[in-house]
Amino acid sequence: MDDAREFDVVVLGAGAVGENVADRASRTGLDVAVVEGALVGGECSYWACMPSKALLRPGDALAAARAVPGADTAVTGPVDVSAVLARRDEVAAHWDDAGQVAWVEGAGLTLLRGHARFAGPRRLVVTTSDGDVTVTARRAVVVATGSVAAVPAALRDVRPWTSREATSAHVVPRRLAVVGGGVVATEMATAFADLGAEVTVLVRGDRLLPSAEPFAGEAVLRSLVDRGVRVSLGAQVTSASRDDDGVHLVVERVTGDDDGVGAAAPETLTVDEVLAATGRLPATEDLGLEALGLRPGDALPVDDALAVRGVDGGWLFAAGDVTGRTATTHQGKYDARVVGDVVAARFDPRPTTDVDDAAVAGGEPLSRAAEAEAGDWSRYRATADHAAVPQVVFTRPQVAWVGRTQAQARDAGLDVAVVGYELGDLAGATVTAADYRGRVQIVVDRARDVVVGATFVGPDVADMLHAATVAVVGEVPLSRLWHAVPSYPTLSEVWLRLLETAGR
Amino acid sequence: MDDAREFDVVVLGAGAVGENVADRASRTGLDVAVVEGALVGGECSYWACMPSKALLRPGDALAAARAVPGADTAVTGPVDVSAVLARRDEVAAHWDDAGQVAWVEGAGLTLLRGHARFAGPRRLVVTTSDGDVTVTARRAVVVATGSVAAVPAALRDVRPWTSREATSAHVVPRRLAVVGGGVVATEMATAFADLGAEVTVLVRGDRLLPSAEPFAGEAVLRSLVDRGVRVSLGAQVTSASRDDDGVHLVVERVTGDDDGVGAAAPETLTVDEVLAATGRLPATEDLGLEALGLRPGDALPVDDALAVRGVDGGWLFAAGDVTGRTATTHQGKYDARVVGDVVAARFDPRPTTDVDDAAVAGGEPLSRAAEAEAGDWSRYRATADHAAVPQVVFTRPQVAWVGRTQAQARDAGLDVAVVGYELGDLAGATVTAADYRGRVQIVVDRARDVVVGATFVGPDVADMLHAATVAVVGEVPLSRLWHAVPSYPTLSEVWLRLLETAGR
């Protein structure tokens, strides 16, 4: 390998975000390299979204069938654990990235296998299996290295599972403790309960899914408890040890307004494995950020064109988890599309006269002029990051939300109307299951008569969310939504009920 | 009972449409009566949407579970026929309308049990079990009597099942012939195949679901055939007889451009029951329409405020199937809301000075002035009937569409782009089932950059439709939809793929 290479654009990280950045940045003819030290395809493909959903779907499908009179008696067993794990292995491509590598190369991008560190502005040293290579970016560098699991100090010595080990597990622990109450914690508690583990969830806070509306976490909590999962709120692991009997966790009660650990006697919980699901940290620890005057380990703060703030010269961009702005694959990919288009337009290598009306192969024109003038909701600005970030949690019930919660909307100074409806009261619920339970709530900005947030809780609501996302992003007034007729008897009829409840 | 009664408004028919008309018309204080000779709640509750979905859901839930590795082996039987029928009985409220009657009375409406015939403008004779009552509407009459199954002449003598007998059946015929290829035909073929019947579908035309995009009917046809249903296209029943061996159908081939019956030798098909699913007729045969100068049996043509055209005085309205404008419960209810609000505003009994700013209890102001000025997309105009009518067919795969098909858009003179994507290529499909097959297609009006039609085909797509309905009704440009991020890995990610395919 040459020990010095040059590209127009260098993208750090070949997860879903990095791949999308690179693909779109190359659309005006820029020469783009992607640097990846681990598997091409990233966290989501191998250790997060995909394998976790593969673990959850079989239990979900059986639960749905069991809830239908006339179908229930045909379901005679639990999930087949080895078949579930085998399917998960397939969905994770057996942790082999050959298919993804082929896609990168087919897209005309250069893949550099190695770990990149900044040596200075637009200059990187990539450590490969063949030695170090100095890589210079003529135009731009985009950091898309993602995030890593945060492991609490009390658990570090016992080498706990993180989301990686949980989603790729080949053995189901008999007793599993899950530390945390967010998306990873609730999804993995659900999955491992399906797989037969005795699951205990230890949550420091006073509810599950704290970033969602409170009724969402309450529904998931009730359902976990109904299925035999122990959920302990206000519980903090203060120390841990591992021996031949398993992992011993010392758990204390969190009490008082100061979140201090209380005076009640600590309890010891012994399990076979413990999953640390206590959040994520931007993967910037070992990128040589100090060479740019930035602090390793910090998120990279960006503007709406995904340019990193506080770095001169306009050459450094970031997208995805590393920005601290988004924490999901889909929103990271959205940012990736924006920054890819920004880079493609700002550094368009074609003569200016050719550009403005030029349709890029397979796409719309990318225009320097349009980029320079780009306002909110243009393809060059990640406006939805502020207004319409969706999230789906594949628990049972599923939880899906977009935009602002009631509390967030009020904190933003909006005069809001909050309208909710029980999904179980719909005709569509009656035919879906004997005892369908769920709830939808929308948050309406009264001044503009538009939906600014929506939360769906219930079986199979994941794909109901997008109607809300379109309404929020499209700023479609309620008076117009009144004409968007949901089909009878689907669960989407909840929209009619919400609008009726709102006083249409 | 008095033999003469007067109300401000008389609504004929207490199905879902009539109930909604009456409820909303009463919101400004009008005195409203509803006349119903059969069960309050109507066709949909007892003999259509609800029982049909109850018959289909168990098979659907088992098929979904069987498609998931790790869940498939836990499904050991077919549906339990008697449990399915028992659940269907519950969903149809055992054909007892006490709950619906209580709702009507609780809403402050007067229920007249009997059959109404016009005796002249605003004057009806209602035949009740206690004799005839003359009913006068001071302000308006709204006809919402729905539709009845059309039975082809060749089948009349054998008293075939219609949708009513099929959805309320208490015995599953060993051999069932379904005549027709539309929504009722395909749904009931699917349901009775689940219940163990040997089903033959006889379709005069050359495809199933002729009002949908062709790929929808093709997918349903393939699936029916794969599950052992015989589907015969271009097949017309020319005569039929019934004896102790069952029903004998003489089936001839439809050939040639003139749809004539061909020269090939007719075949005889013997079955235990035959379902006539060949469309519906407006229920206007026995309403005394001749007293108004209208022809019995015809649909009642209406304007966008649902006023019947060709009747003087502005007192006659119609909504639902009877108008020939819509054929679904949900769109009929939409029209019902519009006509209810129009009647409530036009005939508002309150002094004019109180009206314009008056908030009606539980609702927005209904305003005479606003009604008079109402344009498209106001609450007083059924604009969506022309642009955004949704339909969901609960076959396997499900079929859902809204707005214009490709052919309809072109016939309307639009310059359209048609963009399709295979659902099976999505990450979300991979985790939903081992071999998920489906397709989504959108029709885009290039001039306005908006979606004017969308079709979804695949398992569980019913609730994906509403996102398209909101986009069509909201006229949200593709450039804005680009910011409506679908969550990964849901099936809704198809929106991203469609927009990418469209060249975003």
Image: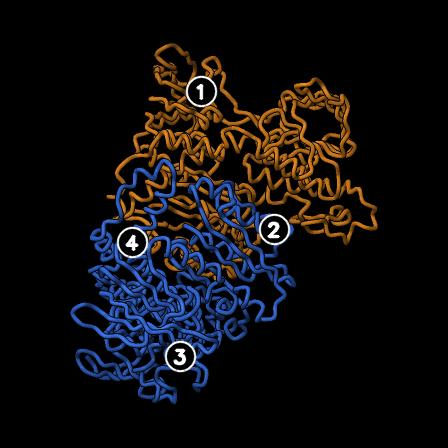
Chain colours: A blue, B orange
Q: Closer to us: mark 3 or mark 4?
A: 4
- From the viewer's side, name the closer residue of A382 and B210: A382
- Residue at x 72% of width, y 35% of height: B32
Q: Secondary structure at mark 1?
A: strand
Q: Is residue A449 above or below residue B89?
A: below
Circle 2 or circle 4, nearest the eye: 4
SS assignment at label 3: loop
Q: Quadrant of residue A52?
A: bottom left
Q: Amino acid at mark 4?
A: Asp
Can residue B496 be seen in this snapshot?
yes
Q: CA distance from mark 2 to mark 1?
A: 54 Å
- The residue that label 2 is drawn on is A501
Residue that label 3 marks:
A299
- Give, as a three-letter code, the residue at label 2: Thr
> N-terminal of the two: label 2 or label 4?
4
Q: Chain of mark 4?
A: A
Identify the residue under disc 1. B260
